[in-house]
Image (tube, rainbow, N blue to C red):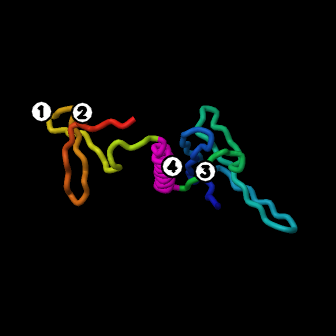
Amino acid sequence: MTFEVGQIIYLLSRKDARVYPAQVIEEIKRKTIEEELISYIIRLPDENRSEVLIEEVNAEIFTSIKDLEANMIENAHNQIKSLLSKTVSLEKVFKPIISKQQIELSTQGPEANQDKVEIDLGNGMTGKINIDELPVRG
């Protein structure tokens, strides 16, 4: 990745959930017989205005807030999907009393009976069941 001296970059820390801006303050070019190496020194926003080689920073580097945000949203989305997937696989330890159709509590204002649930039967149809009347299997 190449940068311009003076450019602001964004560092997404790998060790904690933090984002830091940094400024590229120096470009260093080294040329050997085999290759040309380019490295950068960045200034951090701490009170000492620390300067470090970009390679020494334990962070993902982004050149725009928009790209950083998209990456963070994708990471969060993937973590949520992973947690939900693990949850669904864990629920298999339970014996279902009611078929695996979604059950939602009825929320029809003050008359709502806490013992009744509304079941989504699919195709836009719903049904209400009194929980107290369900047979319990052991």
Question: The residue under label 3 is which amino acid type?
Answer: Glu
**Local SS, label 4:** helix
Assess disc 3: are there few (<14), some (14-19) or many (≥20) residues with their C-alpha within 10 Å of its C-alpha: few
Residue under pointer 4: 82
Up-down: is 32 above or below 96?
A: below
Can you tell which of label 4 and label 2 is closer to the viewer? 2
Q: Are marks 4 and 2 in contact (CB under 8 Å)?
A: no
Query: Which element is circle 3 on?
Result: strand
Residues under numbered marks 4 and 1 in contact, where contact means CB atoms less than 8 Å apart: no
Compare marks 1 and 2 and give the one earlier in the sequence: 1
Amino acid type of the residue tagged 1 in the rendering: Glu
**CA gap, disc 2 to disc 3?**
54 Å
Q: Which residues are magenta?
A: 64-93
Side (left or right) of 77 relative to 61 = left
Residue density around tag 1, few if under 14, some if 14–19, many if 20 or more, within 10 Å: few
Q: Which residue is mark 3?
A: 60
- The residue shown at (19%, 38%) is 107
Label annotation for residue 111: 1
Asked if labels 3 and 1 touch by Cβ distance under 8 angstroms, the answer is no
Nearer the observer: mark 1 or 3; the answer is 1
